[in-house]
Image: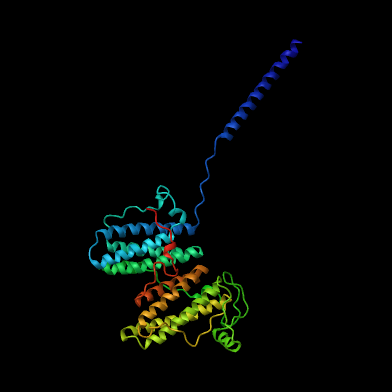
Amino acid sequence: MNDDNQENRPRMRYFRYAVLSLAALLVLSLGFALIPADPPEPPAPPFTEQARAAALADALELRAAGLQLAGGTADGGAAAGLDRVVTLLTIQARALLLPEAAAASPATATPTTPAPAPASMTAAGLATALAASGTERLRDAEAADGGMARLLAGAGTAQVLAAQELAAAAGSPDAVAAVGRAVPGGTANVSEAASTAPAADPGATAPATPGSPAACPLVPSRQAAASEKAQSGEQVLPPGPAAPGSALAALAAAELEAVYGYQAALARLPADAAGPASEFLRRHQDLVEDAEAASRLRCAVPPPQEPGYVLEPGFLAAPAAGLARLEAATLPAYGDVVALTDGSARTWAITGLQAAAERTVHWGGDPGAVPGILLDEARLPLLPE
C-alpha cells in the first residue's frame, strides 16, 4: 500500500505542474488577446487627391504672399499685377477646396491654412514661385483622374500666364528669364496619342494595338461626311458626349470655326498684327487635321466643314477682340479632351490648352481663372477664415 502511494506522488506532482503550466499559458494568452494591437498605417491617398491637396496648399501659400506684398506694395504696375494674382489664386483655391473642408470648424480647417509668407518675398520672387507652381500643376494634370486633370491643367495654365505678367510688371529681367525657364515646352502628336500605329489611310479601319482604341468600323473623312450630309439632308453628329472621340470631334469643330474667323480677320488687321495672325491661322489648320485624325481613330465622325460661320456683330469692325473671343471659345473643348483622354493625347491637349490661352491673352482677351472650365464662382465654396 505504501509502495502504491510512493509511486502516485510523482505522478500527482507532474499532473499539478501540467495544470499550472496550462493555467499560466491560458492567462498569458488572454492577456495578449486583451492588449490592443497597433492600428495599421492608413493607406496613402490616391495620386489625384495628393495632387489636389498640393495644388490647394500652394495656392493658399502664394495667395498669402500676394496679400502681404499688396499691403505694402511699390509701383502701380506691380500693385495691379499683385491684385490680379491674389484674385486668381483665391478663385483657384476655392475651386480646389473640398466642400466639407469649407464647412468645417476653424480647428478642423487648420491643415489648409497656409504658413505666413516669407518677409523677404518680392514681386519678382512671387512670379518665379507662381511659375513653378503652375508647372507642377501641369505636370500633375498628365497623371490625375479626368475631372481633376482638367482643373489642374487650367489652374497651371493660368498661373504660368499670371507669372509672366507679374514678372514683366515687376521689371525684373531675372524673374522674366526664370519664368520663361519654368514654362513647359514641347508638343505631342495627337494622332500618336490615339493609336500607337495609326492607319496610313485616314478613312481605313484603325488597327487595334496595345494601349490604343479597339478597331472600329470605317469612319468617313470630313469630305465624305459633308457629301453624305448634303445628299441626305441629315446632320452628321459624333456618337456621344462622353466619348473621347466625340470630344476630339467637338474640338475639331471649334478649331474649324477659329480658322474661318482668322481668314475673315486677316485682311482687316493692321500690318503689325497680320503676321502673328497668319502664324496662328496655320497653327489652327494643323490642329484641325490632328484632332480629326485622332477622332477617327477613336471611332468618331469628324465634323463636316461648313461653308461659313456666323460671326458675331462687330467682329469685322474689331477683329482682334473677335479673335480673342474665338480663342477663348476653344478652351472648354480642350478641357473636355484633357478630362476624357490620357497618355500622349492628354499631353497634347494640355499643350493646346496653354497655347489657346496664350493666344487669347495675345488678342487682349481673358482666358479666366481656370482656362478650360466654365466656372460659376457663386457656387464655389468659401475659404475658411
| Viewer-nearest residue: 198 or 125 | 125
Q: Is residue 341 among the parts visible in the rendering?
A: no
| Viewer-nearest residue: 338 or 12 | 338
In the rendered structure, the answer to whether residue 205 lies left or right of residue 64 reads right
Spot occupied by residue 210 in the image (x, y as percentages of width and height)? 58, 70
Q: For residue 125, which quarter of the picture?
A: bottom left
**Residue visible at 57% across and 73% down?**
240
Q: Is residue 83 among the parts visible in the rendering?
A: yes
Spot occupied by residue 272 in the image (x, y as percentages of width and height)? 31, 84
In the rendered structure, the answer to whether residue 356 lies left or right of residue 344 reads left
Looking at the image, residue 291 lies above or below residue 382: below
Looking at the image, residue 277 lies above or below residue 62: below
Q: Residue furthest left?
A: 75
Looking at the image, residue 222 lies above or below residue 179: below
Q: For residue 17, which quarter of the picture?
A: top right
| Viewer-nearest residue: 35 or 241 | 241
Q: Residue furthest top?
A: 2
Spot occupied by residue 278 in the image (x, y as percentages of width and height)? 38, 84
Image colouring: rainbow
Q: For residue 62, which quarter of the picture?
A: bottom left
Tally of numbered tags: 0
**Residue visible at 62% across and 76% down?**
216
| The N terminus - image quarter | top right
Spot occupied by residue 246 in the image (x, y as percentages of width and height)? 55, 74
